[in-house]
Image (tube, rainbow, N blue to C red):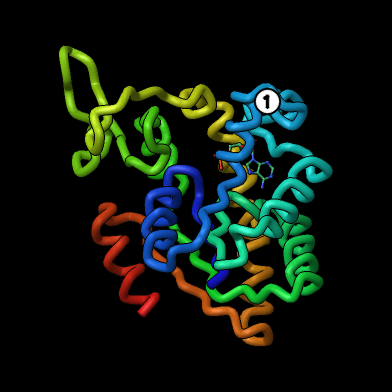
Amino acid sequence: MNILIFGPNGSGKGTQGAVVQKKFNVVHVESGVIFRENIKKGTEIGKKAKEYIDRGELVPDSITIPMIISRLQESDCAKGWLLDGFPRSIEQAKALDEALAKARMKLDYVIEIVLDRETAKNRIMGRRLCANDNNHPNNIFIDAIKPVEKNGKLVCRVCGGELSARSDDQDETAIGKRHDIYYDTKTGTLAAVNYFKEVANKKGIKIIELDGKPGVREVTEELMKKLG
Ligand code: AMP
């Protein structure tokens, strides 16, 4: 099972992605996570990517596209993958489509979480990352996934792990830039979504559209229903 998941930053894409990953037991490939790991390890890719990420800009295609395409060809991805955070532009969508055709990999599902820009922005500002597991959802503005207090400090509601805010999550200008890219239907991420919608029939790809407004649990239920 090979799946793409789309949604603006703040739509709960990572959380729903983790659910899909478990359901189908596929590898969760997240471009943003791969970049952050590279930054942490101080690799060449990490050094080059950091300045773009901090500004909320896309890392150049010359770095991103080969990094993702080669990741999908690693042996663990043979059992299926869920790609999250890529493609983010029409160019990346075309590059992925071509690479998949070449590798004879079929795309089974495209999941799109639909959420308005204002709601997405507020959710991002409240988001906190768990040091133990990137997929433990915590958000200080969403009651259902509020972190818990321990010794006067907010900790992960799932495992009690240490929490931090991503620096690019607290910068309104950077958030605005990321959303400009996402909501751009000409060349940005929504253009990439539309690209796959257009070829869906011909290529046998199932499209799943989800309303991202309700709470995490409701969105998950809707997703499970539509995945069958
Ligand atoms: P994310 O964790 O998905 O929000 O990604 C964090 C940052 O990594 C983005 O703001 C970009 O700077 C970079 N990034 C992630 N995915 C891509 C991509 N497909 N193309 C270019 N840059 C990306």
Q: Would you say 138 lies left or right of 10 here?
A: left
Q: Residue 38's quadrant in the figure?
A: top right
Q: Give the total of numbered labels.
A: 1
Q: Residue 69's quadrant in the figure?
A: bottom right
Residue that extends furthest to the front in the rendered view of this protein = 75
- Could one spot residue 73 in this view of the protein? yes
- Could one spot residue 187 in this view of the protein? no
Q: Would you say 224 lies left or right of 61 here?
A: left
What residue lies at 54% left-to-right and 69% top-to-bottom? 110
Image quadrant holding the C terminus, namely bottom left
Residue under numbered circle 1: 50
Where residue 35 sits: x, y (%)?
A: 63, 35
Q: Residue 193's quadrant in the figure?
A: bottom right
Where residue 179 sits: x, y (%)?
A: 56, 42
Q: Is residue 205 above or below residue 11?
A: below
Name which residue type carries label 1.
Lys
Q: Is residue 55 above or below residue 19?
A: above
| Label 1 within 8 A of ligand 1 by Cβ | no
Q: In what quadrant does ligand 1 lie?
A: top right
What residue lies at 44% left-to-right and 64% top-to-bottom? 25
Residue that extends furthest to the top in the rendered view of this protein = 152
Q: Secondary structure at mark 1?
A: helix
Where residue 33 sits: x, y (%)?
A: 56, 39
Most foreground residue, 215 or 186: 215
What residue lies at 53% left-to-right and 79% top-to-bottom? 206
